[in-house]
Amino acid sequence: MGTRVRAVLALSAALAIIAPLSASAAAPAVAPATSSAPAVTALDGPPPAAPLEFRLAADADGVVTDDGALAVSLSVDNPTLSTVRGGRVTIAVGREPLASRSQVSAWLDGDSRTAVRRVGTAVVDSIAARGRSMQTTVLELGEDLEPGVYAMRGVYDSAQGPLESRGVFTISDDAGAGQVAVVVPITAGPRSEGLLSAEELEQLTSAGGALRSQLNAVFGTNAILAVDPAIAASIRVLGTNAPESATRWLDDLMALPHTRFALQFGDADIAVQYAAGLDEPLTVEDLTPALDPEGFSAPAVEPSPTPTADESGQPTLPDVQTLTDIGRARSDVFWPAGGTAGAELVTRLGEAGTSPAGSLTLVPSDTVRGETGARATAGDADLLVYDADVSRALHAASTSDMIVDRDAALAAATAYAAFADPEAPLLVTIDRADARSAAALRSAVRVASGIDGREAVGLDSLTLAPATEVRVDDVEPDTGRASTLERFLKGEADLRQFASILEDPQVLLAPERADILQLLGNAWIDERPAWRDAVATHRAETATTLASVSIIPSPDINLLGSSAPLTFSVRNDLPWPAELVLDTEPNDLRVVVQQSTEVAAGASQTTRVDVPVEARVGSGESSLTLQLRSRTMIPIGDPVDVTISVQAEWEGVGIIVMSAIVSILILLGVVRTVLRLRKRRGARQLAAIDSREKTDA
């Protein structure tokens, strides 16, 4: 009914705008100063007012009480900046019950002119600017109406003219037969990171948070839970460091007696995975790198004379199965997003899984042909067929913030359910949604659990119902999302090769797979612009990771001797050390190099690498090609070319020059010594002569 009301209001707004425009059509246009400016049309009178919004809905889930009384909620919103006068609301109901679901839909969509009769009126007082008027009136329908679904119409004589709103109500036959199964998803909404952070968990699981609201909504019901295992894993990887509210939430989930099944990690879109050519759904194989070591204490071990491996004192870390456990769940149950599961996908999912009981696939009734109940088969595939009309109405109720809109959606759900076979089990869902209120979700679960007087049952009872053979429509795959997944998988394959440089490749690969599944989440289907931004961000992050280890380009090198080590630098921006091999290949015969040099590149740092080089012939220009590889010889990054200027003769010339200098220095030293000795000898001779002369005298 909300869609129909919006359409009526949009039409009223359009008429309000067109009228003054038409009246001013003959007014002359104001000529602009320059011919390049657009023409401006003068309007007569004030600008058109924003349209009032009028709604009505049957209370009590749209079910008439035994005494023939029907409570109806009325709501009028005034979005204008002025107070508007009040008016009278005239309420009329159908003379005969609607004969089918198609008639119900046609009436609510405004496409039907079902005969109605006036049964009551109400008065709406004046409404302040940007205010809202809400009231409830009780209609006495009498006891002469037979069981069935009836049309209801309200016409509000407003200041802007008559406004119409439509609804339905149901007179029950009190049969109280049949069963109903209600599937409720427990999901965290659209995400691009594989696991929720501690801050996100605290927000979502505290009072008023989305996850806490979802859990509260199913307490005391027999709803079937469809749980995203990524939520449980996000809590468990933190160990004792998980927020208290998150730990309590997980304990509450595990303690619930409800039957349940696990969605794919991140509630990933399974139809897209098969459309991308996969043979089986993607899984998260390891979450160990995400574990918070400080959240897991070593077990207390009594000392023994002969210590064992269990007495190592190391904490016992949970594996991926333990981390993603959601309790007593049936395996191999698949719930593709509504309208994405065609005949081919249903067949392939029927072959998937390893459960001895076989797989089950949930599909909406509007994609199935044949006499259907909740249990069906399509070839060899086992199906659970949920009522599309009732489920859409319940979903609308669960996402409605205004009470009158919620009441209208719940009344529509009750009306659609009245046409279901009372002898066959009815399956309904309250489909995935983000940021809905606890009150709205709780109301939808409550109504669904007893709709049309049925008894709520769990998954086990539902699967025991007899199955009918049906045909599933073909559905065109979402090629855009499938192409995106193919690019994701190509990037993951590149990361797998790149991660071979790490001691534990899973520190890169496990988060990548978890991120991919989250980006494939069904919650993104209706958020295409935001999803495209998230995809672009993820691809940029992958490219950055692949470029995080590389050779820093080197300037030209002068080799002045016949042999010397050349120094190169390897950059590692990863937070983990990398084990690499530097391949060095000369491009001519002028130099001989060490072909492979092992490199231990430290985390988040630049490492210097010395490569021995020997000049084979004389001077000239040469070059080397450098390529980083993993220990398994997988190329890492792009190759780098380095130019070398070889000046090998400088070594011989240097030796000759040095020899000459040394010889000259030695010769000069000898000459100096000889001269000094001669000088000393002459001095002694002169002294001797002087001595003799003095003696003779």
Image (cartoon, helix red, strand yellow):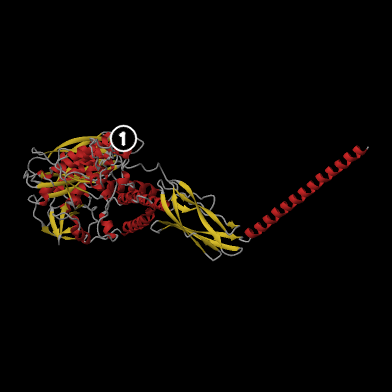
**Residue 511 located left or right of residue 338:** right
For this rendering, which residue is in front, 158 or 608? 608
Instruction: Please say if 347 is above or below 219.
Output: below
Q: Residue furthest front?
A: 696
For this rendering, which residue is in front, 219 or 582? 582
* Amino acid type indicated by mark 1: Gly
Q: Position of residue 303 (x, y in %)?
A: 24, 35
Residue 614: image quadrant is bottom right
Q: Can residue 264 be seen?
A: yes
Q: Position of residue 42 (x, y in %)?
A: 45, 47
Q: Can residue 117 be seen?
A: no
**Residue 567 located left or right of residue 281:** right
**Residue 558 located left or right of residue 533:** right
| Image quarter of the C terminus | top right
Mark 1 neighbour class, 10 Å CA radius: few under 14, some 14 to 19, many 20 or more: some
Q: Position of residue 52 (x, y in %)?
A: 30, 41
Q: Residue furthest right?
A: 697
Q: Residue furthest bottom?
A: 589
Q: Position of residue 278 (x, y in %)?
A: 27, 59
User: Which residue matches tag 1?
Assistant: 131
For this rendering, which residue is in front, 538 or 586? 586
Instruction: Please say if 509 is above or below 294.
Output: below
The residue lying at 78 percent from left, 49 percent from top is: 674
Residue 343: image quadrant is bottom left
Q: Secondary structure at mark 1?
A: loop
For this rendering, which residue is in front, 213 or 114? 213
- Report the number of numbered marks: 1
